[in-house]
Amino acid sequence: MAMAGYSKSEVTKVVLERNMGVNDLPSAVAALRSVYGQQELGMSEVLAGASITTPEQALPFMQMHHYTLQQMVVVLKTVFSRTSGEATTLLSNQFLPNRVYTLNEILNKVALGYSSNEESTILDVLAASNVTTPRAAIVTMRQLGYDQVNEQGDLTIITRVLKNGYGQNEAQATELLIQDAVYSTVMISAGITAVYHANEEIGRTAQLLIGARITDSLSAVRYLAEQEAGIDLTARVLHEIYHEEMTAAINYMSYIPRYTNTRILLAVQQASGTDPLFGYLGTLKLQGASAYQIANELEKQGRLESTFMVGTLMKLGYSKESIVYELLNRFSTFASEEELAQHFVTTGFTDAASIAKQLLRTKYNPNEGVRPARILILALPAASHGAIALGMRNAGFTSAAVISGLLTFGFDDTVAVLLKQLGYPAAKASSILEEADYSTEERVIRLKTMGYPLSEYFHTLGGYGKLVPILKRQGFTAIEIAQGMYRSNESWYWILKYLDEGGFSDLPTLVQAYYRSGQPVLWVIRDVYQYGSTNINGVITHRWALKDVVNQLLSNEPINMVTLAGLINYANGNNYNETFGIVKTLSTAEQAALRNQLGVANFLVGDHVPNVVGLTVMKSIGRSAQQAAVTLKSAGGVSDYKDAALILFMAGYGVTDVIDAVFDNYRTEIGIQVLIALFSSGMGQILKDWDKYKFVITRVVNIVSYHVE
């Protein structure tokens, strides 16, 4: 065909059209070259002969016929007049999806074919894509696959373009990549470090890790340990490239047996510029360490200070109970109450019982309450001291410990009202109140409010002169007060005096209170009567008549006339006439009872019933007929010997005694002859009828021997 005059292009086209197969094309090209010369047949003729007119058609054709990547670059540059950027884009689109060539291979060949560096080639690509901003460049380069090197995520190329092509500094490039929100901080950090610190140790290490295809922290630690990179550099890598928290960094580095905990902590602290101890302790907690073990570790590190320990344990999430247990065991002997109280508040304790329980779990003695009370008061300033007292007691402190503590640091009314609840007897409660500077009246008020009987604490109050008015104001009766004084061994005079001057001055009240106080009844009338007596220049005057004193006792107490007569006689110094007169006056009930029982005998006794009752009483207390006759004549007003004999008989005296008594006391009135006549007439008749009147005598004796109402 060539000899027939066809042009080279026409011949080439025909030959190639008939020999386009993969196996035929090399022979066809060789034949053409043999005719037209080795250099005369170029790629333009081959492509034209193959009817290829675009780069997109040329690249698969050349790939199919085993043209090299470099040849493709040359064709794109010389045949199709494409720029380096356009060439890179065309080659990337053709070969990267199918992984025929890597991006590095494409960039290298383009750079070689166009006599430019890698960055300039990529910039050409970006320019061809109308990319003008670094933010858009990141997106486009990702789309073109520039974030992959050897099928491994790698931002070195993108970072280098940002630095050399767009003039971004380290901070700006980092910010752009973070805002892009596609890549991990580890990838970003590795790329930034490799580019901006390429000539530094950390940069070279980043490049080393990228080259070793290491992307995770633990693998990096192990790899660097194998390379003997050193613990400090390893810590920097974890912090600057992988951005690990201190806790995680400590955890990863602990996988290397030769790294000690202390050395790890120091390396991490130097790398991060902050204290890594908390992170390390957090790791220990995750591994099951108790608060006790954490505190021990702080001690090993020389960091065992109460506030730091409490704060650290709280941040680590330990319970408030376990925290204060360590606090109290380690610091209670030398930490102040203020410091310990603040730690209780900080850890979240809000009630007295729970704080007191924690104190007792450690070194505090349940019998000693001064320091615990102080801690509780400081920790719970809004709580009443009564609530604190109950909290301590319920937690296990003894009542004595509770009160001793509060007496020292804050005994008030809220505590005072709890004394009985805390188990104190009245006397001790009164003593505690006195120690707490309560006045006598305040003590009485509190003790009464708590329900203590006056008798149980009366002897603790003292100063009866001032006490009795106080007790009266607080509603106590004269009887209660008198009983208190009597049990306190106060003398009879002062019992009456204190009652009298304390507001219980009326006779009925004094007599009743004094009698009910516990005094023997024998002394009651005498003591009250004598208390009301004064002796001025030998002249004795009485505030109350003895009869009135006796009458008050008789009015208020169930007492018979015989007993009463003995008391009267004791009071007036055996003044029998006075005793007889008082008995006659006050025995109205007995006299009425006798009249009711006399029946038909009433005509005989008549108006002598008072004297009969009176003498019967006097006989019962031991008065003889002779003595009775004297009393009857002088105090009873009986001048008639016949009446006297009758009354004496009715009082129960014997016949002979009556005759002797009447004869001795009424001799003048009757004379000897009259006496003889007496026994032969009227008196004789009485004696003769003696048996008739025995029933009357029995009735009178029974009446005066028992209380009659």
Image: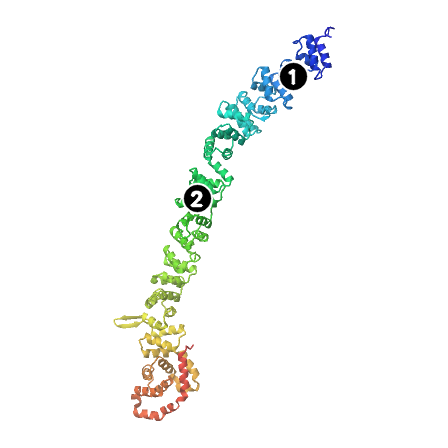
Left or right: 40, with 197 as reference point:
right
Q: Is residue 586 visible?
A: no
Q: Nearer the viewer, residue 173 or 594?
A: 173
Q: Residues within 10 Å of mark 1 (few under 14, many from 20)?
A: few
Q: Residues within 10 Å of mark 2 (few under 14, many from 20)?
A: many
How far across and how far down the image is residue 241, in percent? Answer: 52, 28
The scheme the figure's colours follow is rainbow
In the rendered structure, find residue 259 and report the number of the disc placed on it.
none
Task: Give the answer, above or below, for where 623 lies relative to 137.
Answer: below
Name the element at disc 2. Answer: helix
Q: Amino acid at mark 1?
A: Tyr
Q: Can you identify the residue that label 2 sits on?
A: 327
For the residues carrying marks 2 and 1, which lies nearer the camera in this image?
1
Distance between the alpha carbons at the discs numbered 2 and 1: 80 Å
Q: Can you identify the residue that label 1 sits on?
A: 67
Q: Quadrant of the N terminus?
A: top right
Q: Name the residue at 33% across, 68% down.
A: 492
Task: Give the answer, above or below, for where 503 lies relative to 564.
Answer: above
Q: Quadrant of the C terminus?
A: bottom left
Q: Nearer the viewer, residue 320 or 128?
A: 320
Q: Amino acid at mark 2?
A: Leu
How far across and how far down the image is residue 175, in percent? Answer: 53, 27
Q: Name the residue at 40% across, 82% down.
A: 700
Q: Residue furthest left?
A: 537
How far across and how far down the image is residue 7, in percent? Answer: 71, 8
